[in-house]
Amino acid sequence: MLLYFSIAALLSVILAAISFWLPLISPDTQKLSPYECGFDPLGSARLPYSMRFFLVAILFLLFDLEIALLLPAPWAIQLQAPLMAIVWASVIIVLLTLGFVYEWHQGGLEWAE
């Protein structure tokens, strides 16, 4: 028991030391800047924001959250009556597919006109 605890503590200390030492080897100028998102921090704050980028980001979040609804499905299938879990997972997949096809036909996934 003591051996396992000492090995775990030693490994934790070594990994923590490496994580503090490793980034100091070659600092990147982009990582040292206060803004890592690609915007110029010294430029104008009134630049037009791409609405297309915003819509694609919102669509990604929507589909990502709906996929998260499917995460309990493997555990729910192990229940006594897995039919309802399969039905609800199928409904979610059909809704995701219909939403994706709708956005595709509306041109919401196109970057260029």
Image (spheres, rainbow, N blue to C red):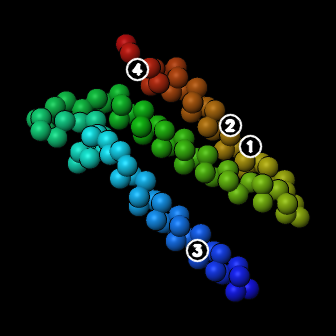
What label does residue 94 carry, if any? 2
Chain-order first, disc 4 or disc 3: 3
Q: What residue type is labelled 4?
A: Trp
What label does residue 10 carry, if any? 3
Nearest the camera: 34 or 39? 34
Q: Tell me the residue at 77%/48% (across/down).
A: 87
Mark 1–mark 4 Cα distance, whole angstroms, equals 30 Å
**Residue 81: horizontal and vertical position, in percent?**
87, 60
Q: Tell me the residue at 59%/69% (across/down).
A: 11
Name the residue beneath numbered marker 1. Answer: 90
Mark 2–mark 3 Cα distance, whole angstroms, equals 50 Å
Verify CB contact (< 8 Å) between mark 2 and mark 1: yes
Which element type, helix, strand or loop, lies under badge 1? helix
Does residue 35 appear in this view? no
Chain-order first, disc 1 or disc 3: 3
Does residue 75 appear in this view? yes
| Snapshot quadrant of residue 35 | top left
Q: What residue type is labelled 1?
A: Ser
What label does residue 50 carry, if any? none
**Residue 68: horizontal and vertical position, in percent?**
60, 51
Q: What residue type is labelled 2?
A: Val
Q: Tell me the residue at 58%/46% (across/down).
A: 66
